[in-house]
Image (cartoon, rainbow, N blue to C red):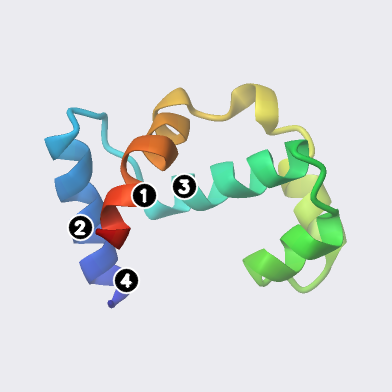
Amino acid sequence: MTRHQLREKLIALTKKADLPPIRVHDLRHCAASYSLSAGTSLKVISKMLGHRNYKFTADTYVHVMPKCDEAAAEAVTRVIPRLAA
């Protein structure tokens, strides 16, 4: 699946689920933030995201959890399982 196809699929699924628009990057950001809050090490998250070093990951995600977009968090639980179907 290309990036464009993934983006189009996500747009269609969020519309079908009556969710606000969500970018793939929003899902990536929330997944990293929730992984961090669940105790996953910064080094593991950094590698998962393809960052060159974990300092960038820390600078980007350590403060994020309180601000994580509710719609993106809801989409993770409602939309992503449908992509596998």
The residue type indicated by label 1 comes to Ile
The quarter of the rendered structure image containing the N terminus is bottom left
Compute the Cα span from label 2 to label 4. 10 Å
Residue under circle 1?
Answer: 80
Please identify the quarter of the rendering in which residue 79 is found: top left
SS class, disc 2 = helix
Q: Give the image location of residue 30, x and y in percent.
A: 56, 42
The residue type indicated by label 4 comes to Arg
Which of marks 1 and 3 precedes in the sequence?
Answer: 3
Residue under circle 3?
Answer: 27
The residue type indicated by label 2 comes to Lys
The residue type indicated by label 3 comes to Leu
Which of marks 4 and 3 precedes in the sequence?
Answer: 4
Along the line of sight, which residue is nearer the eye, 61 or 39? 39
Residue under circle 4?
Answer: 3
Compute the Cα span from label 3 to label 2. 14 Å
